Image (spheres, rainbow, N blue to C red):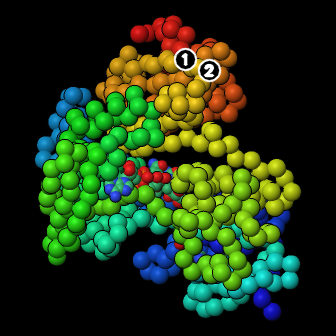
């Protein structure tokens, strides 16, 4: 007889493993199936985020930033660092060990919460009495059943039609994170989040980087003023970003890659590069789930169709994270995973899509929550704006990093915070205050009246809130 569970989670990324832990905390018998393999063929739970996404990219961003500081910024502090070298193999090995610590941590957490982990591919076999039968194909094959199924199978990199990823010359995020040497010339297609983060890593290490972007605007989803400030900083660093291009034929030679494109002026350009990273978005992943066996509904993009509560068209089947609508972010996947587990337990799980923060971990970092100025204009909302530059912040001066600003957008009548946008040092951490404020429906004045430690970067947040009412103290 097949093993029976209350809840089976398919996918062990941030959406899946967190859903499994929360369901187990709520008293359910839970199984979590994940097929990701480490180099030795063993389990490597954590999904894209842990293995080829959030964690390894931040490890490489950290290493390359140290290198950049040693080469270009230590001297300002009176430190002489001669003959600074980067051992790429060691940097990548460190990144791999950070990933492994996270894989092991997740396995430990699943065990601690008494979640049964299956290493292999989960697929629907059909309906079982009061639930579903799921086949697990790993080293062995077995079938398990559950009343409730949570699908968290994530996403894969989108390929350009006609150009396959070989992960040698034409790289997805996977290959981009494990280059063995610094390419002399690196081309990227897509100046979104991955393009900017990966472009930054390899530029800092010495690559000549060109990013080709199809749209005429830079970071269109970001507040225009913030995007403009970020672009200025990237230009200064030598990160070459060409907007409004049309990519044509790509020739993957044995030793290099040639990208033919038309630039914004309509000129035909041939770009030769040692490596090409394609970062033009990601596609939901339902490969091998055998959705047809149970009639699970997908949309035209291949995403699983869900309602606001992550319910699919099938009773007892839920889906969360990158495989459904909404932003493809690890913390969004986690929030949905927790909410679904709580809904299964009859509780009122809740995800506030209006307060999901975004962070781009470049230097300067870019972070935001809520609506941009251009969105408020389009929505016809009367608003007040307040900005404060890091140039006028004592801690930023002490750090030697005064790029950027904090910007508040508040309702013109009620003063409720509608959006907070940041570009500058450590704004990935500063944005949390804005998220909390918006979650509690705070006004700009609320933040302006709160005591912030001195000297800290967070004072720029307070000052930007004061700026909404045109009463900054230090600018
Ligand atoms: P995934 O993390 O993709 O996990 C899905 C898991 O399911 C995988 O382990 C997969 O092997 C497994 N699986 C799939 N099908 C089956 C099956 N049939 N049976 C068994 N297992 C299966 N987001 C952030 O918030 N912050 C960041 O800094 C950030 N950086 C990123 C950097 C890069 C380079 C990339 C590519 C992404 C980044 N993201 C970041 C996005 C983030 O990784 C995703 O939003 C997140 O991983 C989605 O989680 P998930 O659980 O939905 O799916
Ligand atoms: P993206 O959606 O962020 O950016 C893709 C870019 O490619 C866009 O600017 C788009 O206009 C451009 N593009 C699309 N087709 C093109 C074409 N044919 N030619 C030229 N340009 C083209 O996608 P990206 O960077 O691949 O990342 C995928 C997702 O992963 C992100 O949207 C995000 O959800 C997640 N992610 C999150 C990170 C974070 O939170 N810090 C870091 C990295 C990824």
Q: Are marks 2 and 1 in contact (CB under 8 Å)?
A: yes
Residue at mark 2: C-beta within 8 A of ligand 2 = no
Q: Can you see residue 154?
A: no
What residue is pinned by disc 2?
A: 411
Q: Position of residue 308 (x, y in %)?
A: 72, 52
| Residue 206 in the figure: left or right of residue 65 | left
Q: Quadrant of residue 225?
A: top left
Q: Position of residue 169 (x, y in %)?
A: 24, 69
Q: Determine if residue 52 is in view.
A: yes
Query: Residue 75: where, in percent of width, then height?
Result: 19, 32
Tell me the residue at 41%/40% (across/down): 220
Q: What is the number of the mark on residue 235?
A: none
Direction from residue 329 to residue 256 in the image, left or right? left
User: What is the quadrant of the C terminus in the image?
Assistant: top left
Residue annotated with mark 1: 384
Q: x, y (%) of residue 230? A: 34, 34
Horizontally, residue 470 falls left or right of residue 381, namely: left
């Amino acid at each position: 007889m097949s093993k029976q569970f209350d809840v089976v989670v398919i996918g062990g990324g941030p959406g899946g493993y967190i859903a499994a832990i929360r369901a187990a905390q709520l008293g359910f018998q839970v199984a979590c199936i994940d097929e990701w393999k480490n180099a030795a063929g063993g389990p490597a739970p954590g999904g894209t985020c842990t293995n080829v996404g959030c964690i390894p990219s931040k490890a490489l961003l950290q290493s390359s930033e140290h290198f950049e500081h040693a080469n270009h910024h230590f001297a300002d502090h009176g430190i002489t660092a001669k003959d600074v070298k980067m051992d790429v193999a060691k940097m990548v090995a460190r990144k791999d060990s950070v990933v492994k610590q996270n894989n092991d941590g997740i396995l430990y957490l699943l065990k601690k919460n008494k979640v049964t982990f299956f290493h292999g591919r989960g697929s629907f076999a059909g309906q079982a009495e009061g639930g579903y039968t799921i086949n697990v194909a790993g080293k062995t094959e077995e079938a398990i059943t559950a009343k409730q199924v949570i699908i968290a199978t994530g996403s894969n990199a989108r390929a350009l039609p006609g150009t396959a990823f070989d992960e040698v010359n034409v790289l997805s995020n996977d290959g981009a994170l494990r280059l063995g040497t610094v390419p002399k010339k690196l081309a990227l297609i897509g100046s979104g989040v991955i393009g900017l983060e990966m472009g930054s890593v390899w530029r800092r290490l010495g690559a000549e980087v060109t990013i080709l972007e199809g749209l005429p605007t830079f970071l269109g989803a970001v507040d225009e003023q913030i995007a403009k400030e970020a672009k200025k900083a990237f230009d200064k660093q030598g990160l070459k970003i060409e907007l409004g291009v049309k990519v044509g034929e790509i020739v993957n030679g044995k030793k290099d890659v040639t990208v033919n494109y038309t630039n914004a002026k309509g000129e035909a350009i041939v770009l030769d590069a040692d490596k090409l990273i394609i970062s033009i978005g990601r596609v939901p992943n339902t490969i091998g789930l055998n959705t047809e066996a149970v009639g699970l509904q997908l949309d035209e993009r291949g995403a699983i169709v869900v309602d606001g509560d992550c319910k699919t068209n099938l009773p007892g089947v839920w889906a969360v994270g990158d495989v459904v609508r909404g932003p493809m972010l690890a913390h969004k996947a986690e929030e949905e995973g927790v909410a679904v587990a709580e809904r299964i337990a009859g509780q009122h799980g809740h995800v506030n899509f209006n307060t999901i923060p975004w962070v781009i971990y470049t230097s300067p970092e870019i972070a935001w929550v809520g609506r941009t100025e251009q969105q408020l204009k389009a929505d016809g909302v009367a608003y007040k704006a307040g900005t404060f530059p890091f140039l006028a912040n004592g801690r930023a001066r002490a750090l030697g990093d005064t790029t950027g600003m904090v910007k508040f957008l508040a309702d013109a009548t009620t003063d409720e915070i509608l959006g907070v946008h940041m570009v500058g040092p450590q704004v990935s951490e500063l944005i949390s205050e804005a998220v909390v404020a918006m979650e509690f429906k705070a006004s700009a004045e609320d933040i302006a009246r709160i005591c912030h430690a001195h000297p800290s970067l967070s004072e720029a947040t307070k000052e930007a809130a004061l700026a909404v009412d045109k009463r900054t103290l230090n600018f």
